Amino acid sequence: MSLAGRKWEAKAKSFLEDYVKKNTPSGVFVLSCCGSVKSVTLRYASDPDGTTNTIETLYKYFEVLSMTGTLSQEGTHLHITLADNTGRTVGGHLVGNLMVQTTMEVALGEPQGLVLGREFDKHTGYSELVVKENG
């Protein structure tokens, strides 16, 4: 699947979530992703002292080095690594939309005989991945 940002304001995360809801009842996992973006909202890892994760929206051109994670009927969990025009990298949990600059190529895989889902985990405070047999 490829998203072209020049033709329209491509919001990659929303596009992928809509695609999964309409086309893949078992959910998908990201095999590969590359492209360029012009804005991204990330949640960074928490500090060792337990400080709440920082969320930041970056308005800058980046190359997508990688994106990994899962999308299901019950939720999305994606992490992304980006590089700016000096080669410096930034990455984290993709919490907001990802605005495509030129193009974004995403290869998705569908689990065979399995369904990806999410269930709230009281220990982590997040909806965590659950894999169940289909049927």
Image (cartoon, grey):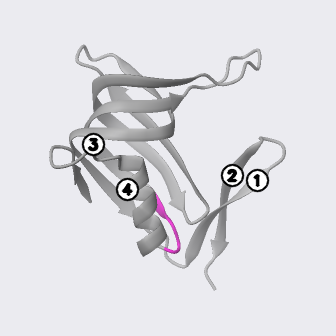
Viewer-nearest residue: 43 or 132: 43
Marks 4/1: CA distance?
24 Å
Q: Residue at x 61, y 62 (%)?
A: 74
Residue at numbered disc 4: 15
Say which element carries label 4: helix
Q: Earlier in the sequence, mark 2 or mark 3?
A: 3
Report x, y in % for residue 27. 51, 67
Marks 3/1: CA distance?
30 Å
Q: Quadrant of the N terminus?
A: bottom left
Mark seen at residue 120: 1
- Amino acid bearing label 3: Cys
Q: Which-is-in-front pick, marks 4 and 1?
A: 4
Q: Which segment is the magenta one?
A: 25-29
- Amino acid bearing label 1: Phe
Magenta: predominant secondary structure element? loop
Residue at numbered disc 3: 34
- Amino acid bearing label 2: Glu
Q: Which-is-in-front pick, marks 2 and 1?
A: 1
- Taking the image as shown, residue 106 lies to the left or right of residue 23, namely left
Marks 2/4: CA distance?
22 Å
Q: Earlier in the sequence, mark 3 or mark 4?
A: 4
Report x, y in % for residue 18. 43, 62
Q: Residue at x 51, y 58 (%)?
A: 71
Marks 2/3: CA distance?
25 Å
